[in-house]
Each structure stands twice: as C-alpha cells, then as structure tokens.
Image (tube, grey):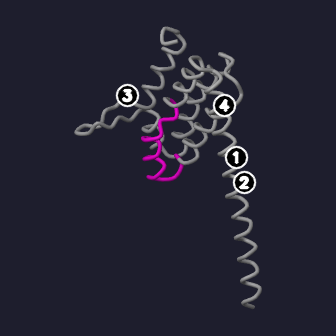
Amino acid sequence: MNNDPVIKKLDKLAWLLDNSIKIPGTSWKIGLDGILGLIPGIGDLAAGSLSTYILYQAVKMKVPKAVLARMTLNILLESVIGVIPVLGDLFDFMFKANQRNVDLMRKYVLNPKDTTQRSTIAVVGVIAALFIVMGLMVWGMFALVVAVINAL
C-alpha cells in the first residue's frame, strides 16, 4: 500500500496541506490548508476544494460509502468550523482532515472490514448527535416561547 503511487501522491498532498510548515521554536506543524483558511471568504473554499481531491481519489479507488461518508464529514467539519474567525483557524491547524482522510484510505486497504465498520459507527454517531442537538434546540425554542407567553 505504501508503494502505491496514488497513495504516495496523496501522502505528499496531505503533508503539504496539513504539516509542511514547522512553527519555529515548537514541535507544531501547519500546512497550506490552515494558511489558506486565513484568507477571508475564498481561503476556506480553496482549502476545501483541495481536500475534495483526496475524496475524489478515494471514490476512484472504490472505497466503500461508509468510509467516503466519514471522509466527507472530516472535510465538512474542518470547512464549517474553519469559517469561525480565529477559533476556526486554530481548529484548521490542529484537526488535519487531509491527513486523516489519507490515513483512512490506507487503513481501508490494509483492513477493509474493520475500517468500514468503524466508519459506519462514526457516521451514525455523528448523525445521531446532530439529531439530538437539533431536538434540544427545538425543545429550547418551545420552552422559550412558553416562558415568554407565561411572562405576558
């Protein structure tokens, strides 16, 4: 798997996007993904587009839908949180979605069944958490409306 030319190219791209720049005086590394994210508006879009290339290669390798969904969630998480000023930029520097996605592809090739199962659990867990959060938000809105009505 490590000799696969596609994976080698994706490793280089993930390194460039996530770990290519060492912060002087620390052991931390950042990449172009985080640097691009600092550009308001187009930066996160450009970084997300580069991240999508890794996902495209996974589709070409016929990676299962559960793993593709997990990879997509990684990109979406980094892109959505990345738009938050300062906090999003720090998250971009730390989360490293590109490296995570290349690692998922490698893990899938080495252990397809386990990686697919873990990805399915992760995706279902994220979806369940989103439904719980949305449910709590709806409940909170109704509670607020009832409190306002009772206060009148």
- Decide: few, some or many residues near mark 2? Use Cα within 10 Å; few <14, some 14-19, many ≥20: few
Q: Which residue is mark 3?
A: 20
Whether residue 138 is situated above or below residue 124 in the rendered picture: below
Q: SS for tag 4? A: helix
- Are the residues tagged 2 and 3 within 8 Å (C-beta)? no
Q: Which residue is mark 1?
A: 127
Q: Residue at x 54, y 40 (%)?
A: 44
Q: Nearer the viewer, residue 18 or 137?
A: 137
Which mark lies nearer to you, 4 or 2?
A: 4
Residue 47 placement (x, y as % from top left): 53, 34
Q: Residue at x 72, y 84 (%)?
A: 148
Q: Which quadrant does the C terminus fall into?
A: bottom right
Q: First in sequence: mark 1 or mark 3?
A: 3
> What is the magenta range?
82-98
- Are the residues tagged 4 and 2 within 8 Å (C-beta)? no
- Amino acid type shown at disc 4: Gln
Which mark lies nearer to you, 2 or 3?
A: 2
Question: How far separated are the C-alphas under marks 1 and 2?
Answer: 6 Å
What secondary structure is the magenta-colored segment mainly? helix
Q: Give left or right: position of 58 versus 26.
A: right
- Decide: few, some or many residues near mark 1? Use Cα within 10 Å; few <14, some 14-19, many ≥20: few
Q: Give left or right: position of 9 versus 77.
A: left
Q: Which residue is mark 2?
A: 131
- Amino acid type shown at disc 3: Ser
- Amino acid type shown at disc 1: Ile
- Amino acid type shown at disc 2: Phe
Whether residue 19 is situated above or below residue 9 in the rendered picture: below
